[in-house]
Amino acid sequence: MIELRANGERLWQSLMTMAEIGALPNGGVNRQTLTDDDRRGRDLFRSWCEEAGLQVSIDRMGSMFARRKGTDDDRPPVMLGSHLDTQPTGGKFDGALGVLGALEVVRTLNDHGITTKAPLEVVNWTNEEGCRFPPAMIASGVFAGVFELDYGLSRKDHAGRTIGEELERIGYAGDRPVGQRSIGALFELHIEQGPILEAEGQRIGIVTGGQGARWYDCEVIGAETHAGPAPMESRRDALRAAAPLLEDIYQVAHRQGPSGRATVGEFQAYPGSRNTVPGRVRFTVDLRHPDGGTMDAMDRALGQAFERARARHEGRLEFQLEEIWYAPPVAFDADCIEAVRQAAKALGLSSREIVSGAGHDAVYMARVVPTAMIFVPCKDGISHAEAEYAAPDACADGANVLLHAVLARAGA
Ligand SMILES: [Zn+2]
């Protein structure tokens, strides 16, 4: 069985075909969740699954499950997949590699007439990215019991449309209950989205867990006034007050050494006029660290940064900080990690253990299902960008490790 190999060319072709949906001029993809392009991507994926003999079902969060029968079909299925939605200027591989790599596993088993003992389910999770509908990984989160279904369906985009409404609109409001069923194991293949594997010349990352992430909505409120007559001293300039606060926020991460992360990814000044002093700014903060205790310390340090800002402005400006989401650090299942390690070893692929820097559906699923992830290197560690690139060989390596880890777990 170890001689079995995925078809790297077919996988690459599928990745490139999927990337045509929502294609951007500089090689990237904009296929944000529940848009018309997401619908086209889902339709294509569904047609490929059906051609491969899989039975596709959709749950109430719109996640797609493509099932392949096992010889012992009453066993809990082994799940493999990722997400097809992207960032606004995303790449061809983030998410798509995990979904289409999983489909390639099934196609390879079909080619060789192999049926596993446990059934397999290829999954495409709704709204992994969270850029259109925060928070991220919402459908796997509902599946794992992190969020209530009503909470998931009622999340809104900037235009005020809900996930539930958009699922109806694109025809992917399924009727299957979300979660509440037994899954034997879950494997997610993904690009690393960081520089470590490439820098060390390792072909496979054996992912032992995921770091924690905290998201915040922040606002500074001052007062608008004319950019000409108002003297500098009298102003309650929200943007100016935010500037030193931002540096304080970055220091929250720097103080935790190389593993700390702090990002302000959205920033808006109002009213957004060049000759009006901004009366209000709103921005987001994203904090990350692999250790739960340190995550708590960073949360406290962020609160103190806001306290210092309040003290600097003595009640003349208001500083608001609201935590909207926390995903604690997660350790993956030892047996599933071992299945990945053994698969890489048997295939003769160099590997190292690694902690995921990004959030993934697998991180939520690990709360309720034995889970592991497989990373492959991506060029310069770049992701969430049009320049994101994983070489055909790396994609094929990942699919082969996924294939053999799944075979070990599902039995053949
Ligand atoms: Zn992803």
Image: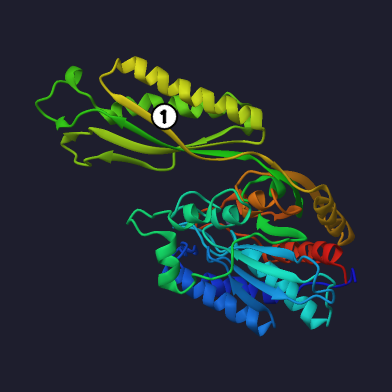
Task: Place residue 118 in its image quadrant.
Answer: bottom right
Taking the image in four quarters, ligand 1 sits in the one at: bottom right
83 lies above or below 331: below
Q: Which residue is mark 1?
A: 246
Q: How many marks?
A: 1
Whether residue 61 sits left or right of residue 381 in the image: it is: left
Whether residue 36 is visible to the viewer of this picture, yes or no, is: no
Q: Nearer the viewer, residue 171 or 406?
A: 171
**Coordinates of residue 395 in the picture (x, y in percent):** 69, 64
| Secondary element at image label 1 | helix
**Image quadrant in which the C terminus is located:** bottom right
- For the point 49% across and 71% down, the residue is 172
- For the point 87% across and 68% down, the residue is 411
**Coordinates of residue 44 in the picture (x, y in percent):** 55, 78
Mark 1 lies within 8 Å of ligand 1 (Cβ measured) = no
368 lies above or below 109: above
**Coordinates of residue 171 in the picture (x, y in percent):** 46, 74
Look at label 1 and name its amino acid: Leu
Crowding around mark 1 (Cα neighbors within 10 Å: few <14, some 14 to 19, many 20+) is some
- For the point 49% across and 55% down, the residue is 152
**Image quadrant in which the N terminus is located:** bottom right
Task: Place residue 229 in its image quadrant.
Answer: top left
**Coordinates of residue 204 in the picture (x, y in percent):** 76, 54
Q: Nearer the viewer, residue 45 or 390?
A: 45
Whether residue 298 sits left or right of residue 228 in the image: it is: right
Residue at the extreme left: 229
Whether residue 71 sits left or right of residue 235 in the image: it is: right
Color theme of the render = rainbow
Whether residue 363 is visible to the viewer of this picture, yes or no, is: yes
Whether residue 200 sits left or right of residue 222 in the image: it is: right
